[in-house]
Image (cartoon, helix red, strand yellow):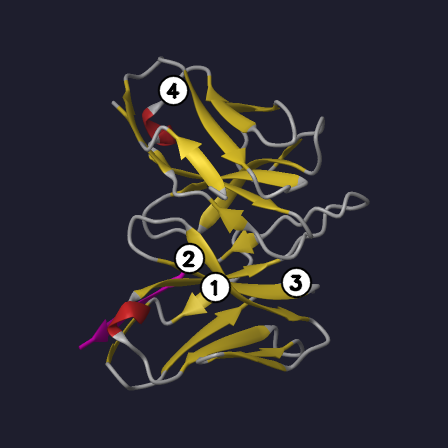
Amino acid sequence: SQQGEEDPQALSIQEGENATMNCSYKTSINNLQWYRQNSGRGLVHLILIRSNEREKHSGRLRVTLDTSKKSSSLLITASRAADTASYFCATDDMYSGAGSYQLTFGKGTKLSVIP
Amino acid sequence: NAGVTQTPKFQVLKTGQSMTLQCAQDMNHNSMYWYRQDPGMGLRLIYYSASEGTTDKGEVPNGYNVSRLNKREFSLRLESAAPSQTSVYFCAGDRDADTQYFGPGTRLTVL
């Protein structure tokens, strides 16, 4: 079952603008991750935020987490054409006793950055 | 380092045929995973292996089997392919149970 749900499903912006994507989830989590997928490629990890963190930065990426609202947002600042991709949030589902995370992915936000 | 590799990249099968999707990693991952991705959907977990010698079902295991051959290799087998198994299959691994590293995918069509 889908844990995370991204919003919007699709987003089109001009190069240089900021892009904001949101993710809502249903159950308590240990961490939330964001992944990027370029067309026809595998997913690439962008950033992980733990449940006890509220904000995290990595380069042009800013992620926030609100556990009381069960939501996260991903902000990409000063977007570039190369940022065109689908972005997925993924929440963990700890496999008890084995230390292996079962990630549950949302359906993704498709971002188009127009040059 | 090749990272996570998958073979084949593309495959077309007829209903009822069998095949094995191969996945290998050289990143010393303890855990490995098989997902499928259908249009407009996120990834859904088919099977995973928390460590060498163990495998467990994920969200959508029906119609699939897996083998964790050794620490490096994790294969996915379709014994009798069905059109509903047309999808893109991704293998992934993780070392520290935080970040998963994905292969490039296998695009499978079942006619």
Image disc number at residue B81: 4
The residue closer to the viewer here, A74 or B95, is: B95
Tell me the subunit letter for badge 2: A
Kind of element beneath mark 3: loop
Q: Amino acid at mark 1?
A: Glu
User: Is residue A94 toward the left or the right of residue A13 in the image?
Assistant: right
* Residue pointed to by mark 2: A107
Crowding around mark 2 (Cα neighbors within 10 Å: few <14, some 14 to 19, many 20+) is many
Tell me the subunit letter for badge 3: A
Callout 2 touching callout 1 (CB < 8 Å): yes
Q: Position of residue A27 (x, y in %)?
A: 66, 62
Image disc number at residue A27: 3
Name which residue lies at 54% across and 59% down. Answer: A90
Q: State how far apart marks 3 and 1 are (Cα).
A: 12 Å
Crowding around mark 3 (Cα neighbors within 10 Å: few <14, some 14 to 19, many 20+) is few
Q: Amino acid at mark 2?
A: Lys
